[in-house]
């Protein structure tokens, strides 16, 4: 009996130790194993917006290009939550990610091995002008309420219902809330993220179109979203994309979920520049030779000719990148370039 109990105890300790060791191994190897030269697969994760069905062709085109560059099987991970994508790239479960600047910085803070690899250039093919726009929009029929001395102003948004994309969104949260914080001299952004404080109600659209839909449905008074993700659905009918007070109209041929709002008009009461989001790599989870192969192929002019990846913004089908000129290209970039967004996110 005594020997039996000792044997049972010994086996229990042995199993416990092997289980702990296995657990430690699985935690540490998730990224390291994936990044080894012998790894035959690469996982690419996308934000909710680019995970939408209408981005299927663009995701598939990128998948094919990554395979051509590395010769490896490329797995695509779509998400419905920004934080899932951030965790995936930070942990190494995904080796590559297509993100906004804010999300990249959050992932980089979790794991310093997460770095920007590529950036869409500005219209001259350089980092100058490598940006897009963030808006605060209101229904056109109520736009005059936001005028002060004949000019649009954000004074009246306090106490209203607002929609953002996600707290991890650069153009759909970080940039517009930075403007609000400065304008109203708030100590921090904490009171902007939920209702009952600065705003009576705060909703999140999960995607940029989702935030716009919250506004079009009348669920909120003001909404934040960017220009590039709404180009397939909205067109400027008065003013321009970079001018405050411009009118945006839902296109007559807009697909769902905008189809039921055809002809409805919105006005931007704020427009702000946003640094282009990076194509991100977990440098510990992806072999250097794969990083170099991807960089070489993706920075070529030939790559930008893929119409499923680059469009002029006029197509109904969205693409991952939009050409601002024939000189548009992807550029190699490092963390230093994102210093302005680092400072903005850190507030």
Image (cartoon, rainbow, N blue to C red):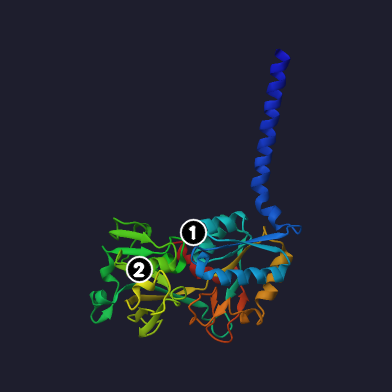
Q: x, y (%) of residue 278?
A: 56, 69
Q: Distance between the residues labelled 2 and 1?
A: 20 Å
Figure quadrant of the C terminus: bottom left
> Which comes sooner in the sequence, label 2 or label 1?
1
Q: Nearer the viewer, residue 316 or 45?
A: 316
Is residue 249 positioned above or below 83 on the image?
below
Q: Which residue is tagged 1?
A: 80
Residue at point 71%, 71% (across, down): 68
Is residue 29 positioned above or below 151 on the image?
above
Q: Which residue is tagged 2?
A: 223
Q: Is 247 positioned to the left or the right of 134 in the image? A: left
Asked whether residue 20 is in view, the answer is yes
Is residue 138 positioned above or below 301 on the image?
above
Q: Is 116 positioned to the left or the right of 179 in the image? A: right
Q: Nearer the viewer, residue 249 or 344?
A: 249
Where on the picture, by quarter, is residue 98? Answer: bottom right
Q: x, y (%) of residue 191?
A: 34, 57
């Amino acid at each position: 009996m005594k020997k039996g109990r000792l044997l049972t105890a010994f086996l229990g300790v042995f199993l416990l130790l092997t289980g702990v060791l296995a657990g430690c191994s699985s935690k540490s190897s998730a990224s390291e194993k994936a990044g080894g030269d012998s790894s035959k697969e690469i996982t690419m994760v996308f934000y909710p917006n680019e995970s939408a069905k209408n981005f299927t062709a663009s995701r598939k085109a990128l998948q094919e290009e990554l395979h051509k560059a590395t010769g490896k099987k490329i797995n695509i991970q779509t998400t419905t939550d920004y934080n899932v994508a951030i965790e995936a790239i930070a942990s190494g479960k995904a080796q590559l990610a297509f993100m906004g600047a804010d999300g990249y910085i959050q992932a980089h803070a979790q794991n310093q091995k997460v770095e920007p690899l590529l950036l869409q250039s500005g219209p001259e093919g350089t980092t100058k002008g490598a940006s897009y726009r963030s808006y605060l929009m209101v229904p056109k029929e109520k736009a005059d309420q936001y005028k002060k001395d004949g000019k649009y102003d954000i004074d009246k948004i306090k106490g209203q219902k607002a929609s953002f994309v996600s707290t991890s969104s650069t153009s759909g949260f970080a940039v517009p809330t930075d403007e609000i914080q400065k304008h109203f001299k708030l100590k921090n952004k904490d009171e902007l993220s939920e209702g009952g404080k600065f705003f009576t109600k705060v909703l999140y659209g999960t995607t940029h179109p989702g935030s716009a839909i919250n506004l079009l449905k009348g669920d909120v008074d003001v909404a934040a979203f960017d220009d590039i993700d709404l180009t397939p659905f909205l067109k400027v009918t008065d003013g321009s994309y970079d001018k405050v007070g411009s009118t945006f109209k839902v296109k007559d041929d807009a697909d769902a979920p905008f189809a039921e709002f055809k002809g409805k008009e919105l006005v931007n009461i704020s427009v702000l520049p946003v640094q282009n989001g990076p194509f991100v790599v977990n440098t510990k989870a992806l072999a250097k030779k794969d990083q170099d192969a991807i960089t070489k192929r993706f920075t070529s002019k030939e790559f930008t000719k893929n119409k499923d990846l680059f469009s002029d913004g006029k197509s109904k089908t969205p693409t991952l990148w939009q050409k601002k000129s024939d000189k548009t290209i992807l550029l190699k970039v490092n963390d230093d370039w994102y210093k302005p967004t680092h400072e903005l996110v850190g507030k």
